[in-house]
Amino acid sequence: MTDLLDFEPDDGAQATQADYTEDNIRTLESEEHIRRRPGMYIGKLGDGTAADDGIYVLIKEVLDNSIDEFMMGNGRQIIVDVDAASVAVRDYGRGIPLGSLIDAVSKMNTSGKFDTEAFQKSIGLNGVGLKAVNALSVDFEVRAVREGQCRRVTFSCGELQSDSGIEPCEEPNGTYVRFVPDSTIFRDYAFRDEFIEPMLKNYTYLNTGLTIVFNGHRFLSRHGLLDLLEQNMTVEPLYPIIHLKGQDIEVAITHANQYGEEYYSFVNGQHTTQGGTHLTAFKEAVSRTLKEFYGRAFDYSDIRNGMVAAIAIRVQEPIFESQTKTKLGSRDIGPQGPTVAKFVGDFIKRELDNYLHRDTALAEIILKKIQQSERDRKAMAGVTKLAREKAKKVSLHNRKLIDCNVHLCDARGSEEKKLASSIFLTEGDSAGGSITKIRDVDTQAVFMLRGKPLNTYGATQRVLYENEEFNLLQAALDIEGGIDSLRYNKVIIATDADVDGMHIRLLLITFFLQFFPDLIKKGHVYVLQTPLFRVRNRLTSKRSGRKKSAAADAETFYCYTDEERIAAIERLGANAEITRFKGLGEISPDEFRTFIGPDMRLDRVTMRKEDGVDALLEFYMGKNTMERQNFIIDNLVIEDDSEIS
């Protein structure tokens, strides 16, 4: 109900209640409601620096309609053109019916997909997607072509601007959509290829035979989820990927010499990053099938340790837990179909069991992997028990972790706040203290490291429990059993910009790569950029007696690069006063407010197959001390600080 109220609070509760009248009750038009509450429709807004930012949801909403056309056998190519500010998508499907074009893109709960005969197992069933894109775009154009006729309409912020009417044309059938997101809603946004390409590739993996041309580059998959795993795995599989396909279901399964589990799940072409009923059923079915195949009382965690897998299913009228469709909530495959659990379970039991009976050599490799995981777990049983008890005794929340309030949110606002939640891993108490004083207590937590962490490259899981720092860190993040229970959406490494700070940063990244690679692959790990220099007007600084917050001083510039420093000096001229920050502890809490607020600069830590992560870690973190020392000497650069005062 609060979404429909529009009143200012008064000085007291009695006055507020007295002012609550019929005049306070409002009914919002659909486009106005979308613009006022965009998070209800596209999740968090963002500026394009994260894969789950709203501008990428807008692209997905447009693409879903084109994918639905392909799934119904119409059009084998989609052209996507993206520049810094706009997106254009052209498919070659049937085209939106011309007489209903305006309603289809502007009237809420209007969609051809309510008719299951026209769209079977569609992703966009609620008639919301294109309307949200329309309402949140300052410039929105859609052109539909059907059998030699076309119609073009344009909108701005959901309001109709022009309509060409139905006219003859010679273009092939299909729909063209172009939109420019509203920069007053998506502040300082920019589209990034690094987030768009994986999304487009996923569409091709899930729709074999579909070609997507992205800014002139062609994406095409011939082997579906098999291609997906091969492209996304950063270590070699222990055995050839098991690839199974059936009616409305496809899976790919393997194991690797890595800790934890790694899954990719999809429903009707939608990447369900938070899983759901289908992924839960898949993990249960695979574990049970392997346990029964070997006739051993294996623990499910041993069976799945090191597993890398993908599952895609198609469901009639899917139910998702939010408009952004990141978690499936459907219990049944369709109105007359079996439950999701039975559908997935029966398929895995039949097909995986048959596969293992046919390929006994592969089955033997899986057995050895499970047995090794079992031995490792039992050898660590005593260590883990003591470590958990120790983590409780040291009073985690008082000693190392300054938590945020996100976990205490009410149900209405908790999901959005959880997406905004983050934890800063700081170097020592000084920087941690500064961040703690001015952080957003609702969504930002702080974990204070003590000294340099251990180099964990090549280490076993025992170090997670025997090393107090890592034991407490995994407890703070709540990832001992995997990242499904991760307490914060972003894990932000905040260390000094000096040699020691860079080393600590590398040690932490090595720790995550070694034991929780999925934390990086799913885009949860970031590095906080902090300024190297502060350049301010010397005269203004002296007149203010340095009482005024430097962060609020209009003639103060925080520079992250030498180029920014030079530009600031040129702007201030002879009055420029330059300070070089050599540690986060030198930055006052008031200044930190600028660096960890809405405009904070973050670099996402990425992990791709082509990066050759294993080779990089072996060189930089391995035991090849002399080789690494010679490399440093050969590539040493001496920085000249003479001009910095």
Image (spheres, rainbow, N blue to C red):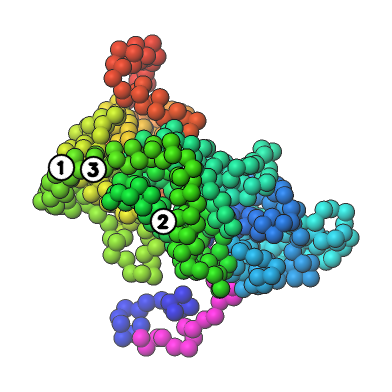
- Residue 383: image tag: 1
Residue 511: percent from left, percent from top:
30, 36
Q: Which residue, given by chain and number where applicable, does mark 3 sit on?
A: 377
Q: Quadrant of the N terminus?
A: bottom left
For badge 2, the amino acid type reads Ala
Q: Which quarter of the image is occupied by the C terminus?
A: top left
Image position of 583 (left or right of 398): right
- Check residue 26 for magenta coloring: yes
In magenta stretch: residue 554? no
The residue lying furthest to the left in this view is 393
Highlighted range, magenta = 17-41
Could you tell me residue 354's position as x and y percent? 48, 49
Vertical comparison of 398 with 220: above or below: below
The disc labelled 3 sits on which kind of residue?
Arg
According to the picture, the residue beneath numbered tag 2 turns out to be 285
Residue sitting at x 59%, y 57%: 247
Contact flag, marks 2 and 1 (Cβ < 8 Å):
no
User: Against 592, is 26 above or below?
Assistant: below
The amino acid at mark 1 is Val
> Is residue 321 visible in the rendered structure shown here?
no
Counting the numbered discs, the total is 3
Towards the viewer: 212 or 290: 290
Q: Which residue corresponds to the image point at 43% horizontal and 48% vertical from the top-left?
A: 263
Looking at marks 3 and 2 on the same chain, the residue that comes earlier in the sequence is marked by 2
Query: Upstream in the sequence, badge 2 or badge 1?
Result: 2
